[in-house]
């Protein structure tokens, strides 16, 4: 994956646990890079090994880390200068989820070797929908829960996201069932904006 992703992981860990913990994780993962170049492409294995090592060192399940990383990604991409891409996603969460492929197509103009995931919505009602996640990669599905929660916060919505179907022999993609359960409180909104 592009260095942008590994940089975000590094910053998330450093912000909560400090540089020394990150160095321990990096050593355990056997990753030599002290910094990741945003626009350089790194083998997916680097990201996978970092997540696995972080899980061991922080004594937290990898799925939980990926979920937290998904939430962080929404804020991180804004701070890194991609806020306009998120703002252009549309006026509602439904619009935003339906526009994810078009958004990644715009990202691919900046990152030409991008291998973006692909999403499809089904069963859309006022407060429920299913998000179908297709990817060339395996193992990153838990990220979607945090990504959708983080995206929901941008629309001042609290959402419940359930990993309803995992890809496997019977199904070539993951399905997430999403329910809008309320609105976020104004104080939290300010922190996110
Ligand atoms: C402005 C915001 C965003 C930017 C700039 C961005 C950019 C990227 C980049 C650079 C990658 C790495 C892919 C590669 O190196 O081949 C990536 C992967 C990914 N993105 Fe986005 N993204 C954004 C928002 C989102 C959102 C809102 C979602 C979902 C709700 C999402 C879902 C994913 C997933 C699941 C992956 C990695 C796993 C896979 O390949 O299946 N992204 N994105």
Image (cartoon, rainbow, N blue to C red):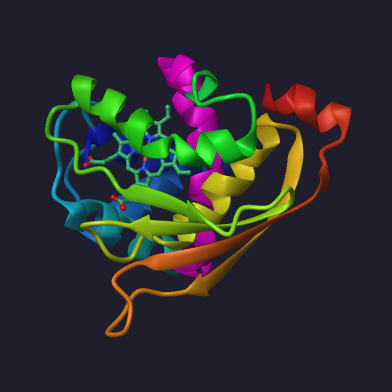
Quarter of the image that includes the N terminus: top left
Q: At 77% from the left edge and 22% from the top edge, which residue is drawn?
A: 190
Residue lying furthest bottom: 169
| Magenta-tinted stretch | 57-85
Q: Is residue 75 visible?
A: yes
Q: Is residue 83 magenta?
A: yes
Is residue 66 positioned above or below 1 on the image? Answer: below
Where is residue 63? Give x, y as percent. Answer: 48, 66
Q: Is residue 36 magenta?
A: no
Q: Give the prevailing secondary structure in the magenta stretch.
A: helix
Where is residue 125? Give x, y as percent. Answer: 68, 52
Q: Quadrant of residue 133?
A: bottom left
Q: At 15% from the left edge and 30% from the top edge, which residue is drawn?
A: 40
Q: Quadrant of residue 168?
A: bottom left
Is residue 1 positioned above or below 29 on the image? Answer: above
Is 26 placed left or right of 121 in the picture? left
Is residue 65 positioned above or below 95 on the image? Answer: below
Q: At 59% from the left edge and 40% from the top edge, which residue is drawn?
A: 94
Is 164 placed left or right of 33 in the picture? right
Where is residue 16? Give x, y as percent. Answer: 57, 43
Where is residue 66? Give x, y as percent. Answer: 46, 56
Instruction: Please state which of residues 79 and 113 is positioned toward the viewer in this rendering.
Output: 113
Quarter of the image that includes the C terminus: top right
Q: Where does ligand 1 appear, by image quarter?
A: top left
Is 159 placed left or right of 117 in the picture? right
Is residue 114 positioned above or below 60 on the image? Answer: above
Instruction: Please state which of residues 158 and 178 is positioned toward the viewer in this rendering.
Output: 178
């Amino acid at each position: 994956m592009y260095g942008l992703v590994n940089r975000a992981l590094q910053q998330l860990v450093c912000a909560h646990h400090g540089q020394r913990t990150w160095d321990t994780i990096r050593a355990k993962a056997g990753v030599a890079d002290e910094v990741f170049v945003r626009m350089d492409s790194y083998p997916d294995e680097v990201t996978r090994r970092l997540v696995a090592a972080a899980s061991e060192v922080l004594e937290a399940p990898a799925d939980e880390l990926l979920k937290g990383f998904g939430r962080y990604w929404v804020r991180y991409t804004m701070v890194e200068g991609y806020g306009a891409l998120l703002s252009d996603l549309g006026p509602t969460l439904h619009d935003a989820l339906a526009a994810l492929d078009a958004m990644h197509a715009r990202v691919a103009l900046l990152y030409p070797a991008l291998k973006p995931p692909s999403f499809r919505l089904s069963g859309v009602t006022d407060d429920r929908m299913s998000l179908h996640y297709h990817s060339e990669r395996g193992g990153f599905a838990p990220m979607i829960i945090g990504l959708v929660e983080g995206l929901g916060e941008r629309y001042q919505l609290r959402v419940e996201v359930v990993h309803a179907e995992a890809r496997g022999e019977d199904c070539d993609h993951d399905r997430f069932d999403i329910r809008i359960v309320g609105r976020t409180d104004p104080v939290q909104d300010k922190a996110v904006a």
